Amino acid sequence: MPTPEQYDVVVLGSGEAGKYIAWTQAKKGKRAIVIERRYIGGSCPNIACLPSKNIIHSAKVASYFARSEEFGITKDNWQIHMTGVRDSKRKMVDGLVDMHLANFKSSGAELLLGSGRFIAPKTIEVSLPDDGSRFLHGENIIISTGSRATIEPIPGLREAGPLTHIEALELDHLPEHLLIIGGGYIGLEFAQAMRRFGSKVTIIERNSRLAHREDEDVTAMLSDIFRDECIEILTNATVTGVEGKSGDRVKLHAQRNGGKTALEGTHILVATGRTPNTQNIGLELAGVQTTERGHVKVNERLQTTAPGVWAVGDCAGSPHFTHIAFDDHRVVTDNLAGGHRVTTGRQVPFCMFTDPELARIGLSETEAKQRGIAYRLTKIPMIAVLRTRTLSETRGFLKALIDTDSDRILGFTALGVEGGEIIATVQVAMLAGMPYTALRDTIFTHPTMLEGLIPLFAAVPSKK
């Protein structure tokens, strides 16, 4: 092996946490390099968060066309062209990649395209696109390899060539009948978008409810919303076999409620979870251990079992959100500077970009009951927020959990238009330890969505 090139920081994978660590260290004068196989900037700007939201927005526009008479607008002969939907997404991605390249240049961090794997402690061999190799040694190594869609070992599934979120975002035609395996966040977002473009859509979910980890009132309303849009939902259904080819004709065999059922369609989309990208990168040669589920084993500082090696984002088992990966960057960056920043106890907000959006921060009712935490519940329908009437978007509700002994906010859920924006205000109040009365008594602009926090928190039951 040639003498490895020496770096202060070597990052394996250019996802959210890894790229920001490299940019930050390079700006401090450190020699930093990022190794990336394919997607410059990681999955979020290329194949996940931002591209999917672009497609979802196109579907939202399509839904407005379908509802045009509701707004006093006549429509004639409108059509969906999936090539145009795809090209709009591609244009956005191209701009994001250019932005990332500019950030690498301005920060001084090096971007190396190739496939990297450990060959010794703190030492990585990078196989280059031209068949050459480079050998790198880092004082600190950051593993930022992300995750991929899980393809379960169902007979015939892999042979059917199913879509994952990656291929679904590149469709240049409209599936006649899309069968979606999985009723979680990814499956639900795609189901609604593709239905609005005009596909027949069926969701096959193994659990008894869609988004089954959420509260029952949340999942019940999501189911109602989806059925109102003529999306077929099969719960308690476990796929046992697949015949045919996705993109042509496929047949799914499933067990449901003790019996057998079969579904036929043209395309399959698999949305049954994520698998960490930790295989075949030589972790065992670097002394880096993994968990039973394949994530890199880390402590609360995101240090692995090998000195000087850190892991961040999906591959480290952090909650699978880009904003959490960004916070992983802050944790590692502070610790590289001699600090002691940890991941324990941090807030984990999330938003599912269905229409309406589902956003939550803090405890749900389900979690509070499981932990034996007493709470006061307040809940109002979205139609009580006057702004929703001006938008003709009145579906959903707001609810919050308040501590029984104090006025502290324990959790907040928004299932409604702009839910992802509404939770930010409540999140800041929770972070500051403010009582719910501070939001109840705030003067919010009229008519805005945040104004709904006033009637919500005005309805909190009194302490017993």
Image (cartoon, rainbow, N blue to C red):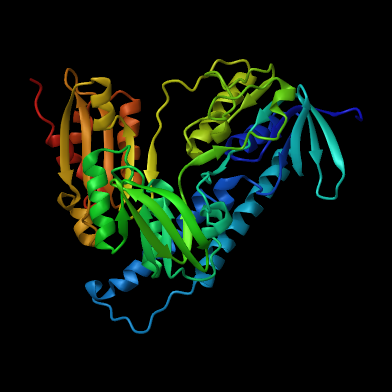
Q: Quadrant of residue 91?
A: bottom right
Q: Quadrant of residue 41?
A: top right
Q: Is residue 441 visible?
A: no
Is 71 placed above or below 133 here? below
Q: Residue 264 location, x and y as percent?
A: 41, 64
The answer to which of 175 and 313 lies nearer the viewer is 175
Q: Residue 102 location, x and y as percent?
A: 68, 48
Is 459 placed above or below 225 here? above
Q: How many marks?
A: 0
The answer to which of 325 and 317 lies nearer the viewer is 317
Q: Is residue 309 visible?
A: yes
Q: Residue 448 location, x and y as percent?
A: 25, 51
Query: Which quadrant is home to the N terminus?
Result: top right
Query: Which quadrant is home to the C terminus?
Result: top left
Kindly identify the residue that appears in the image at 55 percent across and 54 percent down. 166
Q: Residue 440 location, x and y as percent?
A: 18, 35
Kindly identify the residue that appears in the image at 65 percent across and 31 percent down. 143
Q: Is residue 80 left or right of residue 219?
A: right
View extreme (right): residue: 2
Q: Is residue 316 left or right of residue 35?
A: left
Q: Is residue 266 left or right of residue 261?
A: right
Kindly identify the residue that appears in the image at 50 percent across and 60 percent down. 243
